[in-house]
Image (cartoon, helix red, strand yellow):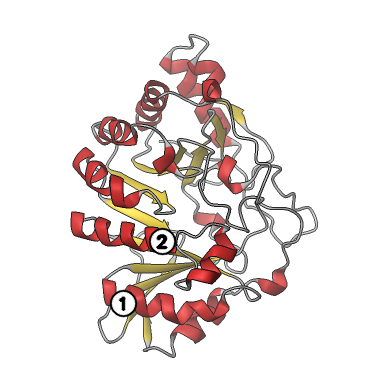
Amino acid sequence: MLTDSQGREIVNLRVSVTDRCNLRCSYCLPEEHVEWLPRREILTFEEIERFVRIVGTLGVRKLRITGGEPLLRKDLPVLVERLVKIPAIEDVGMTTNGVGLEKLAGPLRKAGLRRLNVSLDTLDRELFRRLARRDALATVLAGLATAAREGFRPIKINAVITRDKNLEEMIPLARMAREKGFILRFIEYMPIGRGDDWSDRVVVSNAEALRILGKIAPLEPIPEPDGTGPAKRYRWADGKGEIGLIGSVTEPFCDHCNRVRITAEGKLRTCLFSVKEHDVRRLLRGGAPDAKIAEFVVNAVARKEPGHKIGKDDFQKPSRTMSSIGG
């Protein structure tokens, strides 16, 4: 199995298929002058498939397709169909901003994708425009409706809440999720992506989120059998769905993290906040045999960071944006 020096078994791989995005969410990207990777530097479908097959032999069994915005990658359903057919892979999900979902939900479902996470921080059109710097709320909501009709289960809504921008959106988002049968997940605002203006003062903690959401209806914890998920899960006591709280800042899950990432241009990152990357593309394009690449991955994962160090004196913020790392 693929195990790091802390004894954590790595079974989860996040695969970024592009660094490009059609939104400019303030916690992720600057509004203008974003430099995208040249197309020749992005891993091909064949390279992605080969890498997934190799790490599958090492114990990876869960994939999440990310970006940037993955729906911008041409012919994405073709890649999905290839990945879901890899014998070792048991689960393939995707995280998207939902802008292209109305058009692609059907083809992706046909290709074998079953689970979706859709980023959505507000239901207010004007606030959405300010946060994402694009007027696309109606498009995202239409995409969610299409995905639900196509039979995606579960559909999770990922919301990043900050005290100074969209704290008042928690209740409307929760009510919408309850009504539509979506699972709502609140993700604490992390110091990554858009500059040096992150402050713990604007972070809405898991504990505070739980107090706010409890105003709708009582919440009960859902026991996690293996305890490896990033979210603390709760069900509504009235039976109308569940929520997840991801406390990366105030309640980090580093001690049971089971994931690594590969960026769109083929750099293996063993933590979202890694300051070191491992160049897989060089091996893929340099004629290295599968065994050599597998050995490279094993050695990189063995040095996986114990934790991200947010809030500590020696914390180092990644030089990349979230879009270029892979969400």
- Tell me which residue sits at (62%, 58%) in the image: 27
Front residue (pair 293, 121): 121
Q: Name the mark nearer the viewer: 1 or 2.
A: 1
Which quadrant of the view contains residue 216? bottom left
The type of residue carrying mark 2 is: Gly
- Residue 252: tell me if it is visible: no
Q: Is residue 82 above or below residue 256?
A: above
- Estimate the x, y position of residue 322 in percent, counting from the top left: 59, 48
Q: Residue furthest top?
A: 287
- Answer with mark 1 or mark 2, whichever residue precedes in sequence: 1
Figure quadrant of the N terminus: top left
Front residue (pair 291, 14): 14
Which quadrant of the view contains residue 183? bottom left
- Estimate the x, y position of residue 168 in percent, counting from the top left: 54, 81
Residue under label 2, please give it: 227
- Estimate the x, y position of residue 249 in percent, counting from the top left: 62, 64
- Tell me which residue sits at (60%, 74%) in the image: 204
Q: Is residue 184 above or below residue 112?
A: below
Which quadrant of the view contains residue 49? top left
- Residue 169: tell me if it is visible: yes
- Tell me which residue sits at (23%, 32%) in the image: 85
- Estimate the x, y position of residue 295 in percent, counting from the top left: 50, 22
Left or right? Give the position of 32 relative to 87. Answer: right
Give the total of numbered labels.
Answer: 2
The type of residue carrying mark 1 is: Arg
- Tell me which residue sits at (58%, 58%) in the image: 133
Q: Residue furthest right?
A: 313
Residue under label 1, please give it: 178
Q: Which mark is residue 189?
A: none
